[in-house]
């Protein structure tokens, strides 16, 4: 394949026919392709997806739920992942060689995952193991690239999700004296704190400056947090909490553990995407909630729970921009390309990375 063919294959420019189709025509097109492919097609959709896309999902969930469903589904030849790049990579790692995974828009990445590349991680590991020897174990949030998951698996570590982070951190401390938690410092800090690790025993690794940020004797460090964050959840602030407390004194505040420590500290509850959804659905009628998570999900919870008063903790919050790359025209284009060629926007992980990443993922799935 020459360079021009490669560029054409990876093009993100939607053909005019999909730009010119009405919403009704696009929806009918997607339904028709789903009907024609039947069980050969599986569309998992993350909770943060737009309504125009999530309506076509065969299953919707958080990253852990969708990873498990992809692994269990051995019937589908084509998996069209309505989420972001690292989720599609995880699906490719966990599915068989006969299955193909696609991402409707290749620009749908994750800013958090991009905050830890493999070269930074390998350099950090070299320096940290010089400081701490073999007393350190790496853990990575699933919001990371396949290369990072592979690195963690190769070094006897595991992946974690916001749903099972506490279980995995407990497991890690049973293996080694210290952990390196990447790429989200806030999830790592909140999880370790909940397990009794004091903040003064947590350090931060700055991958840009390549230095350990810590005051005190390094032998007291128990957790090394990668200096990364979710660009959505980091924007919830203590000021947002104060405003809600003032305006709605009886309103409960529930936030995602990717939020800053001080926000989680002030909230009434904190938990994974699934935890938040379950809490709202099980809440009594007439209760009031301020939710600190992605706006598409908050709007959906408002729509699906009309018997409760629900607002976003930050009324000026935008939806996750990379999740919003996946829209109805891109989904229709992706499905058309599958029918025509079966190759457009396919996500593939090298066997080397997949083999090591499977080890890290398997340890996580054992602790669900």
Image (spheres, rainbow, N blue to C red):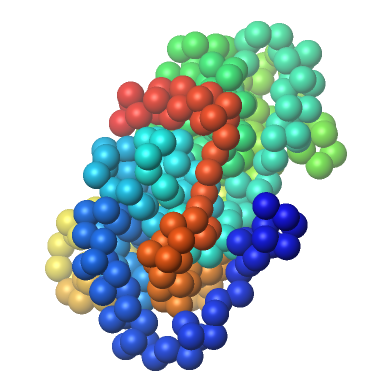
Q: Residue at 72%, 23% (x, y): give it.
A: 125
Q: Residue at 68%, 41% (x, y): give it.
A: 116
Residue closest to the eye, 55 or 329: 329
Total marks placed:
0
Q: Position of residue 347 (x, y in %)?
A: 52, 49
User: Along the horizontal axis of the image, is 199 left or right of 133?
Assistant: left
- When the figure is inspected, residue 355 is found, relative to residue 233, above or below; the finding is above
- When the figure is inspected, residue 167 is found, relative to residue 69, above or below; the finding is above
Residue 137 found in image quarter: top right
Residue closest to the eye, 150 or 198: 150
Spot the residue most to the right: 209
Q: Is residue 149 visible?
A: yes
Spot the residue most to the front: 1
Residue 336 found in image quarter: bottom left
Q: Residue at 33%, 67% (x, y): give it.
A: 54
Q: From the image, which quarter does the C terminus lie in? A: top left
Q: Residue at 54%, 16% (x, y): give it.
A: 156
Q: Position of residue 188 (x, y in %)?
A: 54, 36
């Amino acid at each position: 394949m020459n360079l021009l063919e490669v560029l054409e294959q990876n093009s993100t420019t939607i053909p005019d026919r999909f730009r010119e189709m009405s919403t009704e025509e696009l929806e009918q097109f997607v339904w028709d392709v789903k009907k024609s492919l039947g069980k050969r097609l599986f569309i998992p959709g993350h909770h943060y997806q737009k309504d125009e896309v999530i309506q076509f999902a065969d299953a919707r969930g958080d990253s852990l739920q969708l990873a498990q469903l992809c692994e269990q589904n051995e019937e589908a030849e084509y998996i069209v992942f309505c989420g972001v790049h690292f989720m599609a990579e995880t699906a490719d790692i966990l599915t068989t060689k006969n299955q193909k995974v696609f991402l409707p828009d290749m620009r749908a990445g994750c800013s958090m995952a991009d905050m830890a590349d493999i070269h930074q991680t390998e350099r950090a590991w070299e320096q940290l193991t010089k400081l701490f020897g073999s007393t350190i174990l790496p853990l990575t949030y699933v919001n990371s690239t396949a290369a990072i998951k592979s690195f963690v698996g190769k070094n006897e570590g595991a992946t974690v999700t916001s749903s099972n982070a506490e279980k995995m951190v407990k497991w890690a401390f049973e293996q080694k004296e210290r952990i390196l938690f990447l790429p989200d410092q806030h999830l790592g800090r909140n999880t370790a704190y909940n397990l009794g690790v004091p903040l003064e025993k947590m350090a931060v690794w700055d991958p840009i400056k390549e230095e350990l940020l810590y005051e005190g004797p390094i032998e007291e460090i128990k957790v090394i947090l990668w200096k990364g964050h979710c660009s959505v959840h980091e924007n919830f602030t203590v000021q947002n909490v104060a405003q809600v407390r003032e305006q709605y004194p009886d309103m409960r505040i529930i936030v995602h553990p990717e939020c800053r420590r001080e926000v989680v500290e002030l909230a009434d509850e904190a938990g994974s995407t699934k935890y938040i959804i379950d809490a709202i659905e099980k809440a009594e009628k007439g209760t009031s909630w301020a939710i600190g998570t992605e706006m598409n999900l908050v709007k959906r919870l408002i729509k699906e729970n009309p018997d409760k008063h629900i607002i976003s903790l930050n009324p000026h919050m935008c939806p996750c921009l990379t999740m919003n790359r996946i829209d109805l025209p891109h989904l229709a284009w992706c499905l058309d390309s599958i029918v025509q060629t079966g190759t457009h926007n396919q996500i593939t992980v090298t066997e080397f990375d997949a083999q090591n990443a499977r080890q890290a993922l398997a340890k996580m799935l054992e602790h669900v």
